[in-house]
Image (cartoon, rainbow, N blue to C red):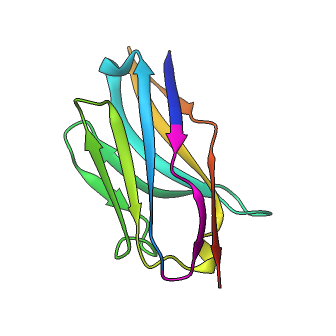
Amino acid sequence: QVQLVESGGGFVQAGGSLRLSCAASGSIGSIKVMGWYRQALGKQRESVASITSGGSTNYADSMKDRFTISRDNAKNTVYLQMNSLKPEDTAVYYCNAKRSRGWSMYDYWGQGTQVTVSS
């Protein structure tokens, strides 16, 4: 099992910045990818960014110039630095971990953290 705890959400004005953190615990040795998703009210959950165990990153096109994902292996923590925030970035942000076990891959989710950007 993997437990994920997010922090760092909040309220910010347009153009501002926030940094989200996701601390992983449990069976973290077999985590292959960690990432962030978001879900705005009335919309489907969408991928924001991800980082592999080897450090390779991937971003949604609309966020790659403003958001940066990083990880601190010593702290088992993944970060999402969000700059130049826009009202349309308002959503609940979820941390995700993909853990391998045998031939299968399992998804784990954090509880979510609210990000609200005012215009």
Which quarter of the figure has residue 53?
top left
* Residue 25 rendering spot, x and y as whole percentages: 42, 21
Q: Is residue 84 visible?
A: yes
70 lies above or below 52: below
Query: Can you name the residue that lies furthest to the left here?
Result: 54
Main SS, magenta residues: strand
- In the picture, measured across the screen, residue 69 lies left or right of residue 19, that is left
Residue 71 located within the stretch drawn in magenta: no
* Residue 8 rendering spot, x and y as whole percentages: 51, 51
Q: Is residue 103 visible?
A: no
44 lies above or below 95: below
* Residue 100 rendering spot, x and y as whole percentages: 39, 22
Query: Can you name the residue that lies furthest to the right here?
Result: 42
- In the picture, measured across the screen, residue 81 lies left or right of residue 88, that is left
Which quarter of the figure has residue 115?
bottom right
Q: Give the residue drawn at x 43%, y 71%.
A: 63
Q: Give the residue drawn at x 22%, y 29%.
A: 74
Q: Give the residue drawn at x 24%, y 33%.
A: 73
* Residue 98 rendering spot, x and y as whole percentages: 44, 32
Residue nearer the viewer, 116 or 88? 116
Residue nearer the viewer, 113 or 44? 113
Q: Give the residue drawn at x 35%, y 36%.
A: 77
* Start-end of magenta stretch: 6-15
15 lies above or below 44: below
38 lies above or below 88: above
